[in-house]
Amino acid sequence: MARVVVDVMLKPEILDPQGQAVANALPRLGVTDVSSVRIGRRIEIEFAGEADLDRAREIADKLLANPVIEDFDIRVAEDA
Amino acid sequence: MRIGVVTFPGSLDDGDAARAARIAGAEAVRLWHGDPELHGVDAVVLPGGFSYGDYLRCGAIARFAPVMETIIDAARGGLPVLGICNGFQVLCEAHLLPGALTRNQHLHFRNRDQWLRVVSPDTAWTNNFTEGQEILIPVKNGEGCYVADAHTLDALEAEGRVVARYINGNPNGSQRDIAAITNEAGNVVGIMPHPEHAVEALTGPSLDGLGFFTSVLRALAGATAGGQQSGGHQ
């Protein structure tokens, strides 16, 4: 078993209203030194055998991320 | 003429879309997401709702439904396809239309009657409108904010592929007030508001939505008269 982690983030130029809403809530916690929050998604893929990064990249490109608005990053999990 | 309406798990407006097709004078044919056959339909509507729960991203999983594989091929061959709301999201995810639909800028689900201006009547689904015509149809979405890079937006405008724009207020923050776009051939249209909810005085704010369905019948009649294939027959 090997775990591959895929991080999906909105491209920097795409507005992230969820992140903005969170950032706007921070002063209510007394936090005033955060200038921006952006929200993404972490996906963990378990391979039955060896971690296959090429396969994971294909899965991420075709399904997990929409390349029009999102970037993704993949890596083999350290503790897998 | 046979207009197919796809039902995905989580579709909500398939019934209304089929009804709108019937009111326009077509035979409505219900298509099932798991069945790749198009059953000889002349056009297809992808309805609103939350296909496959809209998990991951709206429309992302529906794009890989067996029926979509067939529809994507047929659309590239000229089959008229109208994606409404979730259907628009599916068309973008399937790369039949450029850009993407993201969370409404104000984060609220927006549900109201919405004025639009028809910018391009040169599509299979809008030829019964006049350029500049103002229409009133319901909008109801949480992720209807249309985004694309500036180059794509400029190309859409230059090529007359912006089909309709929001007027009297943009309900979701869509770039350049875009409510509907089309592909290069004009047979595939995606629209965020719901024409199928504006086809009868009893339930809709107007009858303006009917024009989308009568337009495709006119386009299909013209294609038949011209001796061309409508592209929908298997």
Image (spheres, coloured by chain):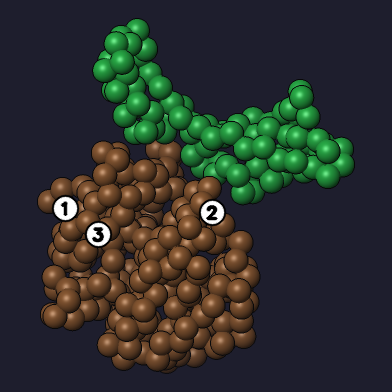
Q: CA distance from mark 1 to mark 2?
A: 29 Å
**Mark 1 or 2 closer to N-term?**
2
Q: Position of residue A26 (x, y in %)?
A: 32, 18
Q: Residues within 10 Å of mark 2 (few under 14, many from 20)?
A: many
Residue at x 56% of width, y 60% of height = B63
> SS of the residue at dot 3?
strand
In the rendered image, which quarter is residue A71 located in? top right
Residue at x 49% of width, y 39% of height = A69
> SS of the residue at dot 2?
loop
Against A7, residue B54 (above or below) is below
**Dot in front, 3 or 1:** 3
Q: Position of residue B222 (x, y in %)?
A: 39, 86
Residue underneath mark 3:
B139
Residue at x 32% of width, y 77% of height = B16
User: Label 1 marks which chain's residue?
Assistant: B
- Amino acid at circle 3: Val
Q: Is residue B54 visible?
A: yes
Residue underneath mark 2:
B60
Q: Residues within 10 Å of mark 3 (few under 14, many from 20)?
A: many
In the rendered image, which quarter is residue B27 located in? bottom left
Tally of numbered discs: 3
Against A65, residue B52 (above or below) is below
